[in-house]
Amino acid sequence: MKIVDAAILASTAASLASAATFAPVALDPPLNWVVGSYLWPAEIIAGYNAEVNSTDWNETAWDSYILAQCETYTACTSSITWQGTNSGSTGGRYWYGYVFRGGATNESFYVRDTDVDSNVTLSSAWTIVE
Ligand SMILES: *[C@@H]1O[C@H](CO)[C@@H](O)[C@H](O)[C@H]1NC(C)=O
Ligand SMILES: *[C@@H]1O[C@H](CO)[C@@H](O)[C@H](O)[C@H]1NC(C)=O
Ligand SMILES: *[C@@H]1O[C@H](CO)[C@@H](O)[C@H](O)[C@H]1NC(C)=O
Ligand SMILES: *[C@@H]1O[C@H](CO)[C@@H](O)[C@H](O)[C@H]1NC(C)=O
């Protein structure tokens, strides 16, 4: 019994030691922020997208999903999500999400996309707390 308890304590301690803490990046409205040149493209770990349709995702669920993807990478230090219009021939609204290495971020790491055709909305970013 003592051996089992020790093993559980050791594994709990190890998972606490490796769990990074993330906090929302304060972004001023309007929320048309995309990734700035420090992170893009050098620090991208992975990118994700999903068609915007009635049931699959909402803003909070997509944002949580992308942050969860970030947390699966030891090197991940920030994430961003937004909704935008696909500039390709098929068009349509998509959720976009990217996860990055490169350290903690603040609003200065992001740039506004004011292109009417991109129509970026609902931007949300997370940064590692160092
Ligand atoms: C939403 O889009 C995804 C990806 O194209 C598709 O798999 C899914 O069936 C769509 N859901 C609805 C409710 O249209
Ligand atoms: C977003 O989706 C999640 C998971 O499906 C759900 O729990 C939540 O209520 C939804 N939020 C809104 C604002 O619709
Ligand atoms: C944002 O981050 C940069 C780089 O770490 C730093 O120089 C700057 O002071 C930060 N800005 C704010 C408002 O914290
Ligand atoms: C931008 O997208 C939003 C959300 O789909 C939509 O309500 C709005 O009409 C769009 N604006 C433009 C200029 O296309």
Image: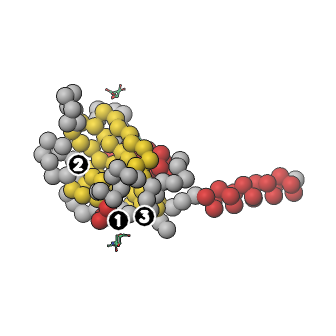
- Residues under numbered marks 3 and 1 in contact, where contact means CB atoms less than 8 Å apart: yes
> Is 47 left or right of 3, judged from the image as shown?
left
Instruction: Name the foreground residue: 78 vs 63.
Output: 78
User: What residue is pinned by disc 2?
Assistant: 121
Q: Residues within 10 Å of mark 2 (few under 14, many from 20)?
A: many
Q: Position of residue 115 (x, y in %)?
A: 14, 48
Any part of residue 9 in sight: yes
Asked if ligand 3 lies within 8 A of label 3, the reply is yes
- Give the mark, 1 or 2, whose residue is nearer the N terminus: 1
Instruction: Name the foreground residue: 26 vs 128.
Output: 128
Q: Please tell me whether mark 3 sits on a helix, a strand or a loop.
A: loop
Instruction: Name the foreground residue: 96 vs 100.
Output: 100
User: What residue is pinned by disc 1?
Assistant: 106
Distance, label 2 to label 3, CA atoms, is 23 Å
Say which amino acid is labelled 1: Asn
Residue 14 disc label: none
Q: Please tell me whether mark 1 sits on a helix, a strand or a loop.
A: loop
User: What residue is pinned by disc 3?
Assistant: 104
Q: Position of residue 53 (x, y in %)?
A: 29, 32
Mark 2 or 3: in front is: 3
